Structure formats: C-alpha cells, structure tokens
Image (tube, rainbow, N blue to C red):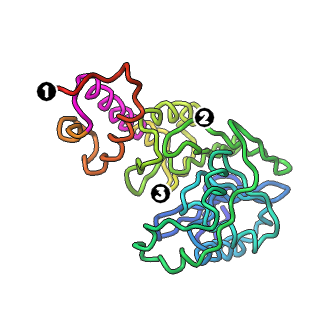
Amino acid sequence: MHTTGRFTEVADRVWVAHYDWLHVNITLVGGSDGLVMVDTHGSTRQARMVADDAARLGVGAVTALVNTHDHWDHWFGNDALVTAYGDVPIHATQFALDKMVERGGRHDAHLADEPHAEEILATELRPATHGFSSAHPLVLGDRLVELIHPGRGHTAGDLVVRVPDADVVVMGDLVEESDKPWIGDDSYPLEWPATLDLALQMITPATVVVPGHGELVDREFVHDQRSELGIIAETIRDLAGRGVPATSALEEGDWPWDPSLLATAVQRGFEQLPRSQKRLPLA
C-alpha cells in the first residue's frame, strides 16, 4: 500500500486525502495512462496543497479532473490544478457545469463569514469543461472509471465515480460522514432516497465508499443514511397530505434528525410536492 503525506491507498491504485478544513476528501484514481483527481477543494491555496500532496505520492501525472457537483468547496480549486497540470479536461454533469459557468467569476456573498474568506475570495474560478447527462466513461489505459449521475439529491447535478475493478465508489455529498448531509436550497429531499437506491446497486458489502466529507464508509452506512433521508421525505409527504402547513411541519413531524437541520428540507419538500399530494392547511 502506497501512502505519502495525506494520500492513503484505500484500494488498488485508488488514493484518498482527507483535509481538516471542511473535512473534504480528494480522491486519486490511477491507471496506466495517468491519474484522475476527484474534486479539487475550495480555494487556490488549498488546491496547491492538494497538488503538492499528489506530487509527493509520485504515482503518475494527473490527466483529468472531476467535480462531483457545483458547490464551491468541491471545485474552487480547479484553476490552481489546471495551472499545475496543464490544460486537462474537467468533468462534471452538464447541470453542474452550467451552474459553474452561470456564476462567472462571482463568489457567494455568504463566504464573507467563512474563516478562510480571504483566500476563497482571492480564488480564480474555472468551471468544468466537459459535461454529460447520465453516464460517461473515462479510460485510463488499463482501467475504466465510470462517472454516473444517479439522480437529484444534494443538488440536481450530483455524480458518483465508480472504479469497478477496485470496488470503490466516490459519492460526493450524496453521502457525508463528518456531519449529516446538507439539505440546502438547491437540494431535492423527496428524490434523494431514490437516488441513493440507485447508487446502492453499485455498492457491495466489500465496496470502499468515499463520502464528500469525513471518514470512509461502507454499504451499511450508505443504507442507513438513505433510510434517514427516506423518513424525512415520507414525513414531509405525510404532513402535507394531512394538511399540516409547512410553517408548522418542524414542530409536528417525528424527525430522525434534529429539526433545526431540516428547515430548508421541509420548505423544499413542500415546494416540490405535486398539488395532488397536498391538502388544504388544517384550521
């Protein structure tokens, strides 16, 4: 097993580095024709550290980048890594690519509250360059790497990276270990469980699962997180079907997580329910 610095080999020619800031995971997948890096961290400074760590590993040249979705902590390092590696392709779902292009060079205003605000705001933004809709193969000589969009969940443009011969699946933020998955104002809480059902079809009891944040997990962990998200989705449907208004749902529901984490989930869920699944609010 080849380990240098932060990168640890977790399966044959698959390395993962865990970074304390945001508990972000960066994955390298190697083949005879080079390396693919999955996610690039959240700033130029952090991405330069990633490049240095990858160079110390000494296992080949990075020939492609992959962004698991369009949230800043997973792609703001793109520019620094293209500077380090040359004009390599950057793969993402077409939805994620379009969202990156749409923002242009703008940084989110809320980043001013981040402890690393200065370095984030100084980061040059470089969107992904190669989009796909449902699946895309990357051939690294003797190894096939599969990019798969299993459906909407954390965002509308999540992808997972599957390395079949090594039995590794990189999940992005469809699964998180360091905290509960973030259900934000661009999430799809009602669809997320079905998206994980599809992803679970790729995961065996022996699969190494790399979450977007936190320690490595396994199929049981993904299944449990899917079950919790399923309870959240069904609770939203049940409350709406009984005529409980969205404004009262957090107090009325029997939630698997602290309700303070679910305000946006409830709002999004009620918005995304078809009219036929809602009743008039109870008097």
Measured Cα–Cα span from mark 3 to mark 2: 20 Å
Please name the amino acid that badge 1 sits on.
Answer: Ala
Q: Which one is nearer the viewer's eye here, 244 or 52? A: 244
Measured Cα–Cα span from mark 3 to mark 1: 47 Å
Tell me if residue 228 is in the magenta stretch. yes
Q: Which residues are magenta?
A: 225-246
32 horizontally vs 6: left or right? right
Tag 1 or tag 2, which sits nearer the N-term?
Answer: 2
Residue in view at x 58 percent, y 54 percent: 70
What is the secondary structure assignment of the residue under circle 3? loop
Question: From the viewer's perspective, is the residue at label 2 or at label 1 nearer?
Answer: 1
Residue in view at x 58 percent, y 70 percent: 6
Callouts 3 and 1 close, C-beta under 8 Å: no
Please provide percent x and percent y for residue 144: 78, 44
**Residue beneath label 2, please?**
202
Residue in view at x 84 percent, y 48 percent: 142
Please name the amino acid that badge 3 sits on.
Answer: Glu
Please provide percent x and percent y for residue 162: 66, 43
Please provide percent x and percent y for residue 28: 68, 59
**Residue beneath label 1, please?**
283
**Residue beneath label 3, please?**
215
Which of the 4 quarters of the picture holds residue 253? Answer: top left
- Give the main secondary structure of the magenta stretch: helix
